[in-house]
Image (tube, helix red, strand yellow):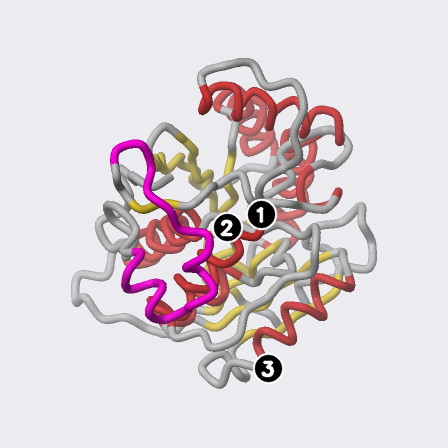
Amino acid sequence: MADKMELHKNNKHQGKYDFPRLIENYQPLKKFVSPNPYGTPTINFFNPQAVKALNKALLITYYGISYWDIPKGYLCPPIPGRADYIHYLADLLQEGNNMGETKPCRCLDIGVGANCIYPIIGHTEYGWTFVGSDIDPVSIENARKIVTCNPVLAHKIELRLQKDSRKILDGIIATEDFFDVTLCNPPFHSSKEAAEEGNLRKLSSLKGKKITKTKLNFGGTSNELWCEGGEVRFLQNMITESRKYQKNCRWFTCLVSKKETLEKLYARLKAVNVAEYRVIPMSQGTKVSRILAWRF
């Protein structure tokens, strides 16, 4: 993660992290920074406290966020990748705008999480306003605290609790709502065991040897990392529900982690008669992901 390649051209996190600048803005990061075997400053990305301190430093330095915290055990996302999603959505929303003018966009972040990262970046970078939804009351309350403690975010981000864990858009989008775009980072795995196995494979690949025991370095509660049927079931349900709200949203989008998931999603998109769909590739170093976008 220290050498980030192929990020979106507008992403502020190109190249290596500027640790001297980050430490200057957030002193607690200093104790986690040490030189790697090549003498380059870095942190241990398998240490959740170190990743959390890095996130705080990045949010202070690049996004003007004075307060940010998450409860123990909750997802602490890598900010450069989250920023990429926002920048690619900005490109999508600008299509067909030959005048180059930007207008305020209203976005729905499905699964905003306790970290509230997408609304933070989307508002501070582009002035977008957000509704963030989540099925976890703790996540909603923590995200609300982040918003209220940062004047730059006040009155720009609304949080809504999803009271039915079987639903995604139902119960969140009101009749009078209109969103320019939805975004979603769905739970990828189908069970806790699958999430742990996936993390072991990732760590084994990164360390060059087989790892047999670990804990998730970015944290994450059950609803953040896994759900029944995994990302396939979740996104199929989201596509099905989106048909009901086709007049409430210009573009529906979501992240898709597994390439093999796409064929099943294409079938569902055709079944609900979307007017257009596309896949937007994203790449951060060795990690390859994609955004699926559709509209009616």
Q: Which residue is mark 2?
A: 51
Q: Which comes sooner in the sequence, label 2 or label 3?
A: 2
Q: Quadrant of the N terminus?
A: top left
Q: Which residues are magenta?
A: 19-38
User: Residue 252, percent across and down?
Assistant: 51, 49
| Label 1 SS | helix
Question: What is the number of the mark on residue 48?
Answer: 1
Do callouts 1 and 2 mark residues in contact (Cβ within 8 Å)? Answer: yes
| Label 3 SS | helix
As shown in the figure, which amino acid type bears the numbered disc 3?
Thr
With 155 as the anchor, is 8 left or right in this view?
Answer: left
Q: Residues within 10 Å of mark 2 (few under 14, many from 20)?
A: many
Q: Residue at x 65, y 70 (%)?
A: 159
Q: Nearer the observer, disc 3 or disc 1?
A: 1
Question: What is the number of the mark on residue 148?
Answer: 3
Rendering quarter of residue 217: top right
Q: Is residue 24 magenta?
A: yes
User: Residue 255, percent across and down?
Assistant: 50, 40
Residue 239 in the image: above or below residue 63: above
Q: Nearer the observer, disc 2 or disc 3?
A: 2
Q: Residue at x 45, y 16 (%)?
A: 208
